[in-house]
Image (spheres, rainbow, N blue to C red):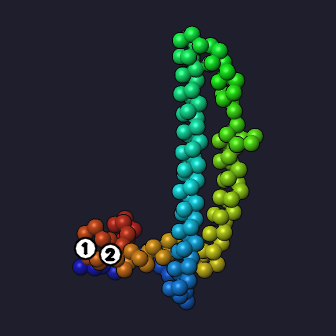
């Protein structure tokens, strides 16, 4: 049995007068931004992996030195330890530049599209998709968490 609350909350409904085509187009802008969010996560993964490699290299260089090859250990310490990953940048600087540049511009653009078309509402396209695909009244197919049903 469905209840009067068995539908999306107001924050996920289509504003009056907005066409399905516009909802889909705005959903596409949001989907593109979600790819950027994923890319940003991978950039953070890159940052963490480079840091991990640096730590592992430091341990390996200590072992190389202990194994009688301080010349090789010193050469790698001079050439690799502390080296920029990109021109003038360590990974944290790459992240900061990305965050304050491309990422911030894309986030602002996506938000401005939602503000201009959906009253700032997020994931309206996905909420429509959920309503089309779920089975109302079936356990596990609720429109929203029970806490928001009141």
Q: Nearer the viewer, residue 111 or 61?
A: 61
Q: Quadrant of residue 110?
A: bottom right
Q: Is residue 122 above or below residue 102?
A: below
Inspect this view and state whether residue 31 appears.
Answer: yes
In percent of width and height, residue 48 lies at 56, 40
Q: Quadrant of residue 71?
A: top right
Q: Is residue 6 above or below residue 95?
A: below
Please name which of the two marks, 1 or 2, marks the residue nearer to the observer. Answer: 2
In percent of width and height, residue 44 lies at 57, 46
**How far apart, in angstroms, are the residues tagged by discs 1 and 2?**
8 Å
In percent of width and height, residue 109 lies at 66, 69
Q: Residue at x 32, y 75 (%)?
A: 134
Circle 1 — which element?
Answer: loop
Which image quarter is the C terminus in? Answer: bottom left
Q: Is residue 88 above or below residue 58?
A: below
In percent of width and height, residue 36 lies at 58, 60
Q: Which residue is mark 1?
A: 138
Q: Residue at x 54, y 63 (%)?
A: 34
Q: Residues within 10 Å of mark 1 (few under 14, many from 20)?
A: few
The answer to whether marks 1 and 2 mark residues whose Cβ atoms lie closer than 8 Å is yes
């Amino acid at each position: 049995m469905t209840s009067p609350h068995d539908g999306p909350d107001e924050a996920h409904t289509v504003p009056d007068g907005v066409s399905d085509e516009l909802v889909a187009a705005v959903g596409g802008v949001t989907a593109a931004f979600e790819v950027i969010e994923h890319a940003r996560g991978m950039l953070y993964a890159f940052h963490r992996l480079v840091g991990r490699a640096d730590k592992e290299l430091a341990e390996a260089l200590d072992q190389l030195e202990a194994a009688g090859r301080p010349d090789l250990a010193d050469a790698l310490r001079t050439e690799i330890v502390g080296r920029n990953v990109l021109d003038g940048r360590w990974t944290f600087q790459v992240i900061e530049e990305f965050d304050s540049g491309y990422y911030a511009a894309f986030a602002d653009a996506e938000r401005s599209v939602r503000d201009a078309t959906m009253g700032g509402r997020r994931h309206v396209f996905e909420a429509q998709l959920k309503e089309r695909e779920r089975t109302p009244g079936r356990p596990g197919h609720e429109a929203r968490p029970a806490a928001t049903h009141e």
